[in-house]
Amino acid sequence: MKERKRKLKPFVMPMVYALAFTALVLSLSALDSIQNKKVSKTDDNYTYVNNSIISSNVPVVKEEKIMVKPYTSEKVEISKKFYDTNESDEEKQNSLIYYNDTYMQNSGILYKSNESFDIVNILDGTVVDVKKDEVLGNVVEVKHSNNLISTYEGLSTVNVKKDQLLKQGDVIGKSGKLELGESLENSLLFELIKDGKYVNPLNYLDKKISDQ
């Protein structure tokens, strides 16, 4: 005698699937509610929120760069300092530049060397002007953040162009010849403008701008 196979009635399986699906939805809903629930600890006045452990809204703190010198050679030295009205009469006299029978106050730092040297960008910035001056030779002007502009004058060669983005330390060009008080074969006149005014570069080089 053959054993008769038992078959589920047609309406049973759909009911099983429906119950399983409902149980799954309820489980996921409960899990999501638990994860997003705020748990407060009133004794220490702390509030713990699960979703705040990892937040994409936390600001990234960037370390402010220190302004580097406009050269890398160890053979470079200062020929003329910035003219500072607060310095002694002797210091002010040594900061005068003689040109075309006229003494002028030095608005930057005049560097010199016995050999040609690379001139580098002091901070990240954008080249806003590249020109050639009859007295100063090739001139490059770079705009940085914090209303700061650096100017490199007397270059023999220029490696950059207007609107070019520069990183700190990028080579701008080579030192050149200047006739400012003395004949300098390998020199650089470096100026720094902060908030529209010439400032003493020695107060900024090797330091953070925010320290000033």
Image (spheres, helix red, strand yellow):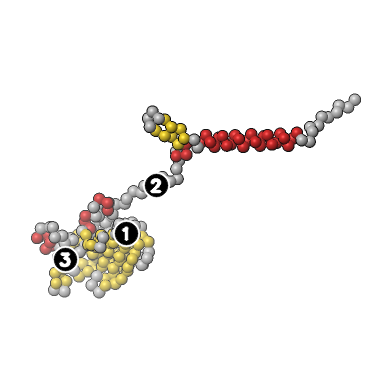
Badge 2 marks a residue whose secondary structure is loop
In the picture, the disc for residue 144 is 1
| Residue contact at pointers 1 and 2, CB within 8 angstroms | no
Q: Residues within 10 Å of mark 3 (few under 14, many from 20)?
A: some
Name the image quarter holding residue 102.
bottom left
Q: Where's residue 96, x and y in %?
A: 14, 65
- Compared to residue 164, the image places residue 60 above or below, namely above
The disc labelled 1 sits on which kind of residue? His
| Residue toward you, 108 or 112 | 108
- Residue 91 is marked as none
- Relative image position of residue 152 (x, y in whole percent): 27, 64
In primary-sequence order, the first of circles 1 and 3 is 3
* Residue highlighted by disc 3: 105
Q: Which residue does the image show at 34% across and 59% down from the upper left?
A: 125
Q: Between residues 31 and 61, which one lies in front from this camera angle?
A: 31
* Residue at x 45% of width, y 43% of height: 55
For marks 1 and 3, give the CA distance.
25 Å
On the image, which quarter does residue 185 sit in? bottom left
Which residue occupies 35% across, 62% down? 126
